[in-house]
Image (spheres, helix red, strand yellow):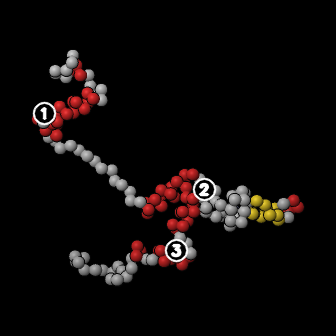
């Protein structure tokens, strides 16, 4: 096969799988994934067992069909969503609302300790601060009270 020569494949300008209008297809179905996620997260998703009527059909005595309270939502008309799923949906939606902050790694320059050793004023300031907090025994400092 010669390099740079195309053999088969899709024609130039033809949409690939990723470019197919998925959002348009969902809109045509009347389905909004964000709305569905928000309903699950907030506990307002309609019950799929009774289509949010709160009632279900059941076989009663003598094989008669009777209307009963929906066993899935217990008449609340809302989908019974676990706390775990609610949390996951909220977490997913949050990604679209607020930017996720990255962890920042900090490392001191290699000569940081050396610079501090050579900076007597800074060293003295840090000792004084530690002493003021009672973090050090002042008897251990040369010229201290001990
Ligand atoms: Zn129900």
Label 1 near label 2: C-beta < 8 Å?
no
- x, y percentage for residue 145? 21, 18
* Residue drawn at point x = 38 percent, y = 57 percent: 100
Identify the residue at horizontal 68%, vertical 62% (top origin): 77
Q: Which of these two is toward me, 17 or 22?
A: 22
Does residue 47 appear left or right of residue 121 in this picture? right
Question: Residue 81: which disc?
Answer: 2
Indicate the position of residue 81 as horizontal and vertical percent values: 60, 56
Disc 3, SS: helix
Earlier residue among tags 3 and 1: 3
**Marks 3 and 1, Cα distance to the nearest angstrom?**
68 Å
Which residue is found at the position 51% from the left and 66% from the top?
34
User: Disc 3 or disc 1, which is closer to the eye?
Assistant: 1
x%, y% of residue 6? 28, 80
Task: Please state which of residues 50 and 125 is positioned toward the viewer in this rendering.
Answer: 125
Distance from Cα at disc 2 to Cα at disc 3: 23 Å
Which residue is under mark 1? 120
> Measured along the vertical axis of the image, is residue 117 above or below residue 21?
above
Residue receiving disc 3: 26
Looking at the image, can residue 49 be seen? no
């Amino acid at each position: 096969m010669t390099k740079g020569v195309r053999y088969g494949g899709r024609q130039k300008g033809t949409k690939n799988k990723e470019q197919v209008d998925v959002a348009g297809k969902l809109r045509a179905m009347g389905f909004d994934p964000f709305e569905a996620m928000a309903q699950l997260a907030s506990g307002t998703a309609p019950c799929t067992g009774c289509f949010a009527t709160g009632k279900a059909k059941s076989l009663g005595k003598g094989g008669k069909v009777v209307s009963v309270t929906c066993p899935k939502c217990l008449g609340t008309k809302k989908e019974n969503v676990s706390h775990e799923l609610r949390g996951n949906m909220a977490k997913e939606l949050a990604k679209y609302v607020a930017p996720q902050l990255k962890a920042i790694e900090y490392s001191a320059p290699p000569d940081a300790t050396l610079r501090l050793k050579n900076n007597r004023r800074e060293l003295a300031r840090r000792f004084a601060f530690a002493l003021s907090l009672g973090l050090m025994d002042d008897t251990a400092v040369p010229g201290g009270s001990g």
